[in-house]
Amino acid sequence: MIDLRGKRILFTGRLRSFRRFQAQQLATILGAKPVNGIDKNVDILVVGIISKPYDQLLTTQKLTYARTYGIPKIDELAFISWCQWRLDQFLDCNNKVTT
């Protein structure tokens, strides 16, 4: 699992589980640094569902840029897994403090 803490992340495509602003807020709370535009400083691109008419390539400008510059990509499920892992860490820390 890629740890997104301190990483500049960017979302592209439609997310099934969240609205984009919700995913950005959650990422911020859990330690990632969401950004709104693609550039070489983006660490990870989180790729949601990309839907286009049948005669168009299933890509986005952000995804094309990431491929060109070798920016790593993860899917929404990997993002959710990371969120769950971070939440588990918070819960473990809180349990140790209160016991």
Image (spheres, grey):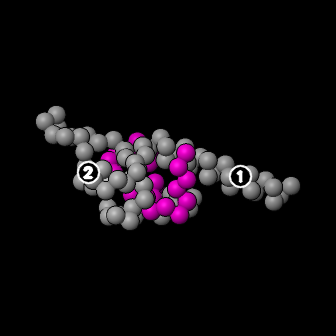
Residue 96's x, y, as percent? 81, 55
Q: Circle 2 — which element?
A: helix
Q: Which mark is residue 64?
A: 2
Q: Residue furthest top?
A: 54
In the picture, measured across the screen, residue 89 lies left or right of residue 75, that is right
Tally the marks: 2
**What residue is shown with label 1?**
91
Q: Using the numbered discs, state the Cα–Cα distance from disc 1 to disc 2 in whole angstroms.
A: 38 Å
Counting residues from the N terminus, which is met first, the one under dot 1 or under dot 2? 2
Q: Is residue 91 left or right of residue 5?
A: right
Q: Is residue 7 magenta?
A: yes
The furthest residue to the right = 99
Let me know if residue 24 appears in the view.
yes
What's the amino acid at mark 1?
Leu
Q: Quadrant of residue 15?
A: top left
* Quadrant in which the C terminus appears: bottom right
Q: Where residue 2 sits: x, y (%)?
A: 53, 49
Q: Percent x, y for residue 49?
A: 33, 41
Magenta region: 1-25
Q: Is the residue marked by circle 1 packed among few (<14), some (14-19), or many (20+) residues within 10 Å?
A: few
Q: Residue at x 67, y 48 (%)?
A: 88
